[in-house]
Image (tube, rainbow, N blue to C red):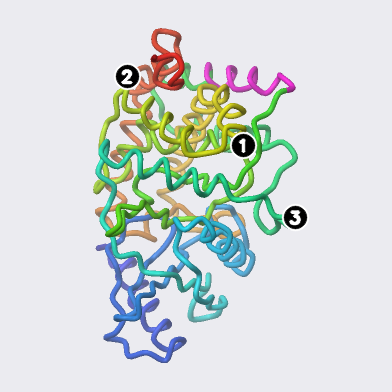
Amino acid sequence: MSKASGTRIEAVCGALAERLGAARDMLSPLPDSGLAHDHVRIGETGALARVPKQSQLGLEAAANLEYQAACFERAAASGHAPRLHDRLAPGADLPMGALIVDLIDGRPLSLPDDLTAMAECLAAIHALPLPVTRSPLKDPGDPLADTFMEIMSQAVFIAGAGLDPDAESQIRAELQAAGATLAGDARPPRTLIAFDAHPGNYLVDAQGRAILVDLEKARYGAAAFDLAHATLYTSTTWDVDSQAVLDRAQVAAFHRAWLGAVSDALASATEAWLLPLRRMMWLWSVTWCAKWRVQSGGSVAGQNNENWSAELSEDALVAHVAGRVDDYLDPETIARVRTDWDGTDTGVVSPALTG
């Protein structure tokens, strides 16, 4: 643990004890496994404090907390997300505030065995009816164009990320392909999506249900983004506890499970988007990697509380992320991932094409 990280988590626990009226020894920090939050178990209450280190959406502290609270409130109706208990407003002691949510007693996903459980979890979230009032969650007029703009905002970091020329060339070719996808008039159906559906963000409970425990970036958009983020190489190898490399048949089986768990209407309207949005979600991931590589060495928060400084996390976590980023930006890795959609075998995406 870095000295800065250790000092911060002790301050967090002290502030939580004061706010909750709890003894300090009731509070147990969980291992530092994410770049955006500290997590603290609250004794035997069955609750967990989620304390933001930063805002991944670039929101000021109160708006960030409101957004995250809405994510949990909306997704909990699926039965596959923790319930929200309380929120602790931002203050001098907790600059970004905190949420109190269910502590999920479960194990990490084991892939490929838990692919169906993950598909059913996402299907339950995607099947939720659209509310009349969708704020404060993002609900862009064109979710594809909005995601592409996020990608382009991250792509500006490519030039300063020290990429191999071949890696940069391949990424820029995919940026052009994504632009071509946007040129058409057709769009996928809109549902509630997590937009952070990588396997490390789930726990499996005693009943075998996958619970999506990280919901800070939920929004209304295309379910195919979540399906991609759940199964891309850049997602399945991200988290140490759930790390796996899926083959094409396993990804196709995951898609079959999801298509069978949602309504016929949602399944038929989504299937054609599995491939193009898989490409776009991968682009989002690798351009984020370029951004992280550039920004992680800094110590000053970016605009509106977005801060990828390595000082906010334990040394081991930062080293792990750096290793993953190096792999994902390697030209050979990029070329291998692109075989998903280069025309040699599209069965990775569409069960209909695999028989």
The residue labelled by disc 3 is: 132
Residue at screen point 24% across, 48% down = 241
Judge depth for marks 3 and 2 and give the one in front.
Answer: 3
Marks 3/2: CA–CA distance: 46 Å
Q: Using the rendered image of the protein, determine whether residue 160 is visible from the camera's viewpoint.
A: no
Q: Using the rendered image of the protein, determine whether residue 254 is visible from the camera's viewpoint.
A: yes
Q: Earlier in the sequence, mark 3 or mark 1?
A: 3
Residue placed most toward the observer, 147 or 265: 265
* In contact (CB < 8 Å): disc 3 and disc 2: no
| Label 2 environment density (alpha carbons within 10 Å; few <14, some 14–19, many ≥20) | few
Marks 3/1: CA–CA distance: 22 Å
Q: Is residue 12 above or below residue 75?
A: below
Q: Earlier in the sequence, mark 3 or mark 2?
A: 3
- Amino acid type for the residue under numbered disc 1: Thr
Residue at screen point 57% across, 77% down = 89
| Image coords of residue 148 (percent x, y) | 62, 32
Residue at screen point 29% across, 29% down = 246
Judge depth for marks 1 and 2 and give the one in front.
Answer: 1
Q: Is residue 82 above or below residue 349?
A: below
| Image coords of residue 43 (percent x, y) | 30, 81
Residue at screen point 39% across, 61% down = 312
- Amino acid type for the residue under numbered disc 2: Glu
Label 2 sits on a secondary structure element that is helix
Q: On residue 332, which mark appears?
A: 2
**What's the magenta region?**
173-185
* In contact (CB < 8 Å): disc 1 and disc 2: no
Left/right of residue 65 with respect to residue 164 in the rendered view: right
